[in-house]
Structure formats: structure tokens, C-alpha cells
Image: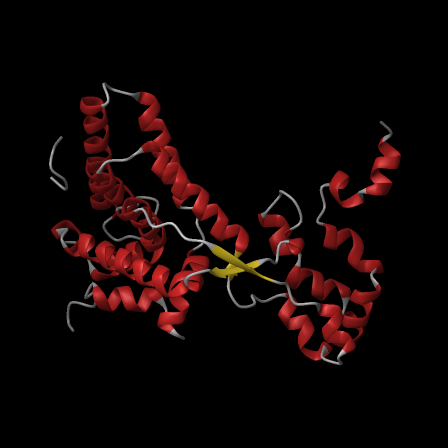
Amino acid sequence: MLFPATGNSASMATKIPGEKSGKCQCETHHSKSILYQILNKEHGSETKWHQQHCSPHCSARSKGCPCLDRRRAVLRTPEATCRRASEVLLKTSTFIRNLPSFYHMPWEDQLVLIQQNWAPLFVLGMAQEGVDFDLREIPATSLLKKILLNQSSTAMNELGSSSAGASFTEVQKMKNLLWKFWDLDISAKEYAYLKGIILFNSECRALKCLPYVQLLQQEAQKALMEFISTMFHGSLSRLASILQLIASLRDIDAGAIEELFFRPILGEATLNVLLVETLHIKPDWL
């Protein structure tokens, strides 16, 4: 076993055309924006700008205008928080190393599972260790100021790229998820089973040993259900709440985690590379 057993529509449309039509605000206003025309004159056509900087976000997020969501955040106490985050990452890698079933898979499958699941595993570890953190929001850079200072040659590129810090929205989503875990007062055994369910993610269809991974995930799910049935008198509501949190974990942005907690430590390196080296994932012939 993997784990041990246990009013007027026209007037309204005039006031807020983007909101009523379901379109992104940038889509409804950029074509007539003086600021946009200044930038567009130097950097290309309206269609090219919209395809590169607006359309992908608008199609991916139907709620609100993502072009307005450029708020960035950094840790208020980076030294202490990054240290605790590193400890969580170390405990997560130790958990994986202690699973013989993980190393029974081909190295390619190990690589896929780590790359696709390290972020939810990390957040789960943050929840288990009770790591909370405070944020400091970074003021957004003014494009108008850059234009007035004759820096418009770089302003367009910065509009579509991330500034320093992590996405405030993504980080706040992670904080809210942590509190949901803490409200449930999840036990150590439940956390262990949850880590197995997340690590052996049967939705990773590129796996060579997919049936084996599916079996391991089912075993972890069964162990979790049996534990909840024994300790919480078969509470279906608790099981449903925990499974819902697992689904929410997979929506956490890995890039935001890396930028917020590990960029000061890693520099230009990536966590994927670090974890692969730490877990000794390599081809069999090496």
C-alpha cells in the first residue's frame, strides 16, 4: 500500500459598454484611446496589439477586465517568510523521496508529475505548517509618465509583461485557500493522503505508466475516505469540502509562487530544475 491504513438598457449600455456587452474594457475603449493611438503609432497596428496583450487574457478570464488587474505584491517580511517557504519545500521533497512507489516509475513520469504538481503540493505544505504571510502592494507603473518622459519605446513591452513581484490576485487567492484548509483543521494523516492524491495526478495524460499512477491515486483516495469515515463518523460533508480544496489547489499559479517566495533565493534559476536535482530525477543510463 502507498499509505498506512486507517432601469433603461440603452442608457446603461452607454455608461458601461464593456460590462454590459461582456467584453473586456480594453477591447471596448482602446480603438478610440488617445494613449493607445500614441503607442500604436510607434509599435504597430491595433489588431496586433489586441491579439498580443488583450485577447488571450479576456478569453481565459470571463470575470471582469484582466487589463485592469496589474497589481503586484511582494512579501512584507521576505527574509523570514522565504526561510519558512524553503523549509516547506524541503519537507515536500523529503515526503516524495520517502515514497518508493514514486521511484518505481520511469524517470520521464517522475519529471512530469513534479513539474505539474509541485505548486499544489507546496501550497498544501504551507497549509500543514501553518505558514501565513503579509503582503505589500507595489504601485503600478504609469504608462503615461513613461510616454511623457519619452520612454514609450519600452512602455508597450512592459504593458504585456510582469513587473517586479507576483500577481496580487493570484497570491490573495492562495492566502484565501490556506485559510480554508485551516478552518477544516486537517490532521497530519489527512495531509499525507492529500499529498498522495495530488502527486499521483491521473490527469497527467502524458505519463507512460498512467494506469499505475491511477492506481496509486485511487489508493490514496480510498485511504482518505476510510480515515474520515472512522474519525469523523463518515462525514460526507468533510470529504466533499476537502476534495473541493484539492480542485482549488490545481488553480494556483506556479509562477506567482516562484516569484513571491523563491525569486530572491533562486535568482535566474527555476524551481523545476532545483526539484529535479534534489529528487535525483534523471535518465536510467546516467
Q: Is residue 187 left or right of residue 7?
A: left
Across and down, in percent, residue 145 comes to 74, 72
Above/below status of 116 relative to 228? below
Q: Residue furthest top?
A: 233
Say which residue appears at 42% left-offset and 56% top-offset.
254
Q: Is residue 157 left or right of residue 10?
A: left
Above/below status of 238 relative to 14? above
Across and down, in percent, residue 228 comes to 23, 26
Report if residue 262 is visible in the image.
Answer: yes
Say which residue appears at 19% left-offset and 37% top-offset.
189
Q: Nearer the viewer, residue 145 or 58?
A: 145
Q: Nearer the viewer, residue 141 or 53?
A: 141
Across and down, in percent, residue 229 comes to 22, 22
Across and down, in percent, residue 74 comes to 49, 61
Q: Is residue 100 left or right of residue 84?
A: left
Q: How many marks?
A: 0
Report if residue 44 is visible in the image.
Answer: no
Say which residue appears at 29% left-offset and 49% top-offset.
125
Q: Nearer the viewer, residue 213 or 246?
A: 246
Above/below status of 263 relative to 185? below
Q: Nearer the viewer, residue 209 or 255?
A: 255
Q: Quadrant of the N terminus?
A: top left
> Could you say which quadrant of the image residue 91 lies in?
bottom left
> Could you say which quadrant of the image residue 270 lies in?
bottom left
Q: How did the renderer colour the structure?
A: secondary structure
Q: Quadrant of the C terminus?
A: bottom left
